[in-house]
Image (cartoon, grey):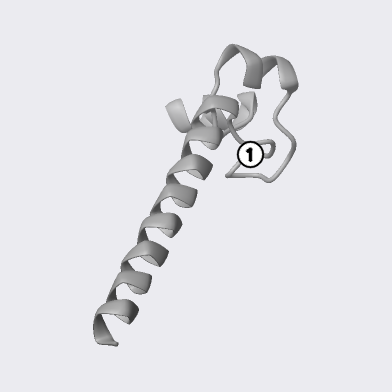
Amino acid sequence: MTDFFDRASELETAFREQAIARHCRTIEQTGYSHCEDCGDPIAPARRAALPGCTRCVICQQLAEG
């Protein structure tokens, strides 16, 4: 009986890790819709030009100093 529960736990962990990896790949490919610093929307043109960007233009300029 323990083997059954161990296997179920292993499968659950594997499915969870796959779901997280899929989610992370989606974020890397499409980027975030809102700036991580100010929360304003990131322009679609910026997201298309820089997939995976996490900041709007203004916040990125401030971060780069």
The residue furthest front is 1
Q: Position of residue 50 (x, y in %)?
A: 55, 17
Looking at the image, can residue 65 be seen?
A: no
Side of 56 where 1 appears, left or right: left
Q: Quadrant of residue 26?
A: top right
Which residue shows up at 71% across the image and 14% down it? 45
Side of 9 where 44 appears, left or right: right
Which is nearer the eye, 6 or 13?
6
Looking at the image, can residue 3 be seen?
A: yes
Instruction: Tell me the residue that label 1 is attached to.
Output: 35
Neighbor class of circle 1 (other Cα within 10 Å; few <14, some 14-19, many 20+) is many
The residue furthest bottom is 1
Total numbered labels placed on residues in the image: 1
Which residue shows up at 73% across the image and 40% down it? 40
Side of 23 where 65 appears, left or right: left
Q: Quadrant of residue 3?
A: bottom left
Quarter that holds the C terminus: top left
Say what amino acid the circle numbered 1 marks: Cys
Which residue shows up at 55% across the image and 21% down it? 51
Which residue shows up at 35% across the image and 73% down it? 9
Q: Is residue 21 above or below residue 49?
A: below
Q: Position of residue 62 (x, y in %)?
A: 53, 31
Q: Position of residue 37 (x, y in %)?
A: 58, 44
Q: Is residue 33 above or below residue 57?
A: below
Q: Position of residue 56 (x, y in %)?
A: 63, 29
Q: Secondary structure at mark 1?
A: loop
